[in-house]
Image (cartoon, grey):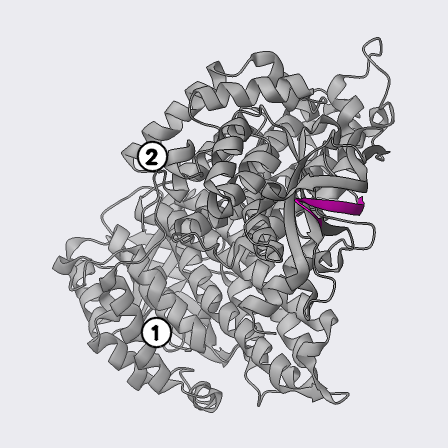
Amino acid sequence: MDFSYDDEQNGLREAVSALLARAYADSEQRRKAVAADPGFDEKTWGRLAEMGVLGLPFAEADGGMGAGPVEVSIVAEEIGRVLAPEPFVEAVVLAGGLVAELGTDAQRSEVLGALAEGTLVPAFAHTEIGSRWGASARTVTATEDGGSWRLTGVKEPVPHGARADLLVVSAVVGDATRLFLVPADAEGLARSGYRNHDGTRSAKVEFTGTPAQPLGDATGDQTAAVDRALARARVAYGHEALGAMETALTTTAEYLRARKQFGVPLSKFQALTFRAADMYVSLELARSTVMWATLVVDNDGDVVTAADRMRLQTSRASRHIGKEAIQLHGGIGVTAEYKVGHYTSRLTAIDHLLGDGDWALARLAATVDQHETVDPTA
Amino acid sequence: MRLHLSADDQAFRDEMRTFFATGVPQSIRDAVAAHREVTKEQFVQAQQALNAAGLAVPHWPVEWGGKDWTPLQRHIWREEMQLAGVPEPLAFNTSMIGPVIATFGSQEQKERFLPATANLDIWWCQGFSEPDAGSDLASLRTTAVRDGDDWVVNGQKTWTTLGQHADWIFCLVRTDPTAAKRQRGISLLLFPMDTPGVTLRPIELLDGGFEVNEVFFEDVRVPSENLVGEENHGWDYAKFLLGNERVGIARIGSTKRMLADAKAHARDITVDGAPLAEDPYLRARIAELENELLALELTALRVVANSAGGRPHPASSVLKLRGSELQQAATELLVDIAGPMSVASFAGADSDVPEWAQVATPNYLNYRKVSIYGGSNEVQRTIIAGSILGL
């Protein structure tokens, strides 16, 4: 077992960190980027593509870099550290990941190549009103007529659904869930985008007999593949949350040193420093679990369970750190002008996009008697 | 970044597992697993079995019986020992005074004490805390005054764990009451517990057990060659010693054992016609504890991998803080699973209350100590806030 990064991985971190530090040197730049649609900076997206970051996890034959989940995790952490609004996890890890796993040769090279080049942003249209966090579709249906498929129903909220050039859509076919590709200009497709609390964008996406292309050759149920892809995206989100939590904590510590009340820095008050110490404990325990989950992905182990374990720990930690970061700042932490509250907002969004801690706990509780002890190296 | 243990470490783990399951008497391991009191003879027997196999003091210098193991191997050794219910080598000997003598002692002291300390031929106890010096150890008041070739010790120590079994004590004493900094006037002395003027008084704890003591010193004469290192430098040795104390204090293997036991016991208890083990709230509580323990174990693995060079990783305070909380949570879980049986602490062998349920509450009460000793959890938070967060 080894938790250290090699030189190449450290180099990747430095490069991504430098790129994002230029784009989001202060929180005002981020506020500007999320003020207008599509809720992120297209130029920064293009620079990430030039660096090869957007093709990182995809096979070279598909136009990618052939890197692994550890490299993906490094990028996600740096995204989270400066709260970069670019949809790396949403477009590359989740939507791109589904195409990489299920797509035909032609679909992979067409979609992933363009994604890697930064010319195509895909989004996964999966969530439906009234259902949550499962791997199956419930109300959007797909029907076949003479060899062509049409989708009917509503997906919402779809992260980056209005900006997306291509939608990967989950739909009910009989008892199964299958995935379909729908380009942005398809007929019978209506999208209305809006702003999320964390500055990113989502959309209501309505299909009315919309023509769609099945993803992959498979005719069976694709639920299990969706479950695995969601698990891998949860782990990547875990790293984004980790970067965000780290900044929330360091920002809070800096503030406790600088801010004076009663004639002394806040760091003189043990009631505050002990709470900061507890935030550090939460951060480090979450970090260990997230790094481990990435190694499980890297090993192609039981990614669904590992992601649940990581999700539970990260959910608890991100709520703890997010809430305490604001409280230890005081009123300024609730303002839009100051950065720390935005970290809490993003952490809250990540916590609810693909499954929260209690949801993961319920899944873990269901199988708790199926093992005597938990062995992380198994 | 790699998930699995290397083939070498895997083989090492198998070797440890096999030895702990076969090289230490089952009766002793059962006593540990059942949270029964381990007798002095059992402690000695277990440590001598480990020492004979070269497994009692792996972290010591090789010339004194240590092994040139990686930090990961030491971690595996410790966790496997706990999982197997093997009593760990006496910490006062192997983690505390042994490494201090090996690092700061004279050659004569090393030869005289180290082999006997490793083999538990000498049982050491710790003379650190005093009635008015707990977390604030530097305020200790026990004095040692030079008289000819001897030091003359007067004062009182407390919380001396297993002092009733001890042959020798390592004792912090004030040798320069006029030192500008109170940490500077402290020395470390070694002397036998049967020296005239040493009196030991046991302290009964909440669980009805006796594991800590008060120790009184009245004109105790200690030969000058029993001073460790330099006069008035005892604080440095104490800090070195307490740093070692924190290593391995997370006791992850032991908590794992308790959670596995909890699941087994919950299957044997019926609530409204169904096994308690099927209660969704209890399942969630156990699943969350298992997950927190996993996070701690992974953190321990990260910390040991980065502790090369002898300096503890700053996150080692996390191990003590969270490790103690999880040990306590596991003992609390066992009390709750025992339910109404949990009051029958001293029902004895004639009772129908199973042994695990009889010891559950005494153990829970006894384990309140783990967030207090080894640098209280508040001291750990102070360390994290100060040395890691710069507050």
Q: Quadrant of residue A262?
A: bottom right
Q: CA distance from mark 2 to mark 1?
A: 48 Å
Q: In the rendered structure, which amino acid carries the disc numbered 1? A: Ala
- Residue in front for this viewpoint, B144 or A103: B144
> Left or right of A324: which side holds A39?
left
Task: Report the span colored magenta.
Answer: B147-156
Say which of B55 and B8 sits in front.
B55
The type of residue carrying mark 2 is: Asp
Please state which of residues A227 and B271 is positioned toward the viewer in this rendering.
B271
Disc 2 packing (10 Å; few <14; some 14–19; many ≥20): some
Residue drawn at (38%, 23%) of the image: B15
Name the residue rendered at 59%, 57% in the picture: B233
Check if mark 2 and mark 1 are on a common chain: no
**In the image, is residue B4 above or below residue A152?**
above
Observer-nearest of B307 and B124: B124
> Which mark is drawn over residue B9?
2
Task: Using residue A247 as the reference point, say whether residue A236 is left or right of it.
Answer: left
Label 2 element class: helix
Quadrant into which the C terminus of chain A falls: top left
Question: Which x, y percent locates residue A215?
Answer: 27, 55
Q: Which residue is mark 1?
A: A164
